Amino acid sequence: MPRSVQTQPLQPSAPHEAFDAREAAPAYEVRTLGCQMNAHDSERITGLLETAGYVPAVDREPDLVVFNTCAVRENADNKLYGQLGQLAPVKRRNDRLQIAVGGCLAQKDRATIVEKAPWVDVVFGTHNIGSLPVLLERARHNEQAQVEILEALETFPSALPTKREQAYAGWVSISVGCNNTCTFCIVPQLRGKEKDRRPGDILAEVHALVDSGAVEVTLLGQNVNSYGVEFGDRGAFAKLLRACGDIEGLERVRFTSPHPAAFTDDVIDAMAETPNVMPQLHMPLQSGSDRILKDMRRSYRSKKFLGILERVRERIPGAAITTDIIVGFPGETEQDFQDTLDVVAASEFSSAFTFQYSVRPGTPAGEMADQVPAAVVQERFERLTALQDEISARLNRGLIGSRAEILVSAQSGRKAESTHRLSGRGRDQRLIHFSVPEGAPQPRPGDVVSVPVTGAAAYHLLADPRDASEYELRRTRGGDAWEAAQAESCAAPSSSGAPGAVGLGMPSLRRP
């Protein structure tokens, strides 16, 4: 199998010494930069590390910091090198500390990372996550940085040990890689061609998650609705959704992300007819201009995109649809941008990830003429986000007075301490902050509450029941699993606090 392996002398830190078995187990911290696929990979990384004898760095400084990186946007590069710079003096003070960089940026930059930050110990790619423990030990023993990048997948990530971020929910990869050639995207170069897992393997993993207490599963792939092409079944994704509907105990099924060009009515039918598939869809638009979509090599046009949304809403009334949009793609004119505003207004997305285009070396778009000036991109970005904020707020206000069924999260909002509210996600994936009436039982993360929606903002809802008669709590196997995980980690169970787990930087579905 093709492989790029390099070693670099470590500097300026002191030589590593092997950990003494009589000392406390080495502690790790994982920092995830990027998408849900990266966050899922980070669960594999934490599982590998704990299998190798590491423990989470809770209330102590880590002996290992692992960065799982993204290469899609320039700010991800800046964030990584900024954080590596902050760790340089820590590394000089602590000769036990090891630093590893993996993920898409590592696959792209390779030895450049060690050249820019020579205090990094290990660089590993998207195809050899399972090699991390060995590379760390080799770097410590040889007192040299280890750079190992494979050009093809070594082991499908789901075959690796996993430590899930939450006991009541989990991600399941159905494929890795991408067969599309979008001119702005470097992912196919970094994660390779699409590789599909067999349906039986996927369903076995879903069953295992449910058996361990998960009540929600999210199916992951770069283009989930192209799943099955590799083994000759173009209807495989719709069949997979329906099969998930037959799994007893699985209450919520989500998936991300589909591609509009390959999105077919059999998937819409499966969503509508499978009760545990949630009424929520993330459908990346990228641009509302047909000319720009062509330059992006996005093989659909705005009319087809809007037609998909119309059919989804016909079959699934009230479905929440979210999207991705890039502002300032090379050559974008004011009319192109107005086309995007028009499609956004017609689409009525509940939320959107909106991004300012940035040049990514190695992509065709990075070589295009007519790069849009930064000031123009910023001004358009502000107009787009203002429009989407207004749409999101209006749609959310329309939900006031309805009842929401919330899967309670272990993470609370930033104002939770002062508002005494807990947080969770509705069936449509909207973020909801809710209060528990005086005298009513407290939910655990993973439990489900039903409450009236009493307030709304652009990117969250509020639910404050007047009394216990408006509040319903259903204790679930997910809540049981969360409580058991707390007991196993020797953390005191708490209905309002998050577990003492490693934060994987799971992205939330909202505009940055």
Image: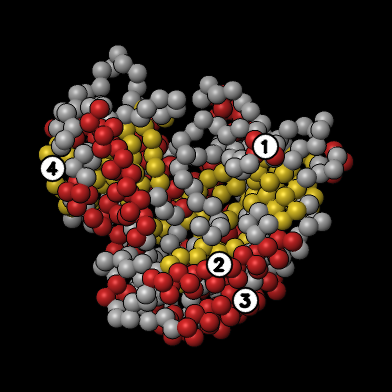
Disc 3 crowd, CA 10 A, few/some/many (<14, 14-19, 20+): some
**In what element is the residue under mark 2?**
helix
Identified at 49% across, 47% down, the residue is 506
- The amino acid beneath tag 3 is Ala
**In what element is the residue under mark 3?**
helix
Task: Name the residue nearer the viewer: 129 or 506.
Answer: 506
Disc 4 crowd, CA 10 A, few/some/many (<14, 14-19, 20+): some
**In what element is the residue under mark 1?**
helix
Q: Nearer the viewer, mark 3 or mark 1?
A: 1
Whether 148 is drawn above or below 437: the answer is below
Distance between the alpha carbons at the discs numbered 2 and 4: 45 Å
Disc 2 crowd, CA 10 A, few/some/many (<14, 14-19, 20+): some
**In what element is the residue under mark 4?**
strand
Disc 1 crowd, CA 10 A, few/some/many (<14, 14-19, 20+): few
The residue to which callout 3 is attached is 345
Q: Earlier in the sequence, mark 2 or mark 4?
A: 4
Distance between the alpha carbons at the discs numbered 1 and 4: 50 Å
Q: Earlier in the sequence, mark 2 or mark 3?
A: 3
Residue 177 percent across, percent down from the top left: 36, 61
Identified at 53% across, 82% down, the residue is 338
Identified at 68% across, 63% down, the residue is 393
Q: Is residue 95 shown left or right of residue 104? A: left
Q: Earlier in the sequence, mark 1 or mark 4?
A: 4
Identified at 58% across, 40% down, the residue is 411
Residues at discs 1 and 2 in contact (Cβ within 8 Å): no
Whether 485 is drawn above or below 205: the answer is above
Whether 210 is drawn above or below 70: the answer is above
The residue to which callout 4 is attached is 8
The residue to which callout 2 is attached is 385
Tally the marks.
4
The residue to which callout 1 is attached is 418
Distance between the alpha carbons at the discs numbered 4 and 3: 53 Å
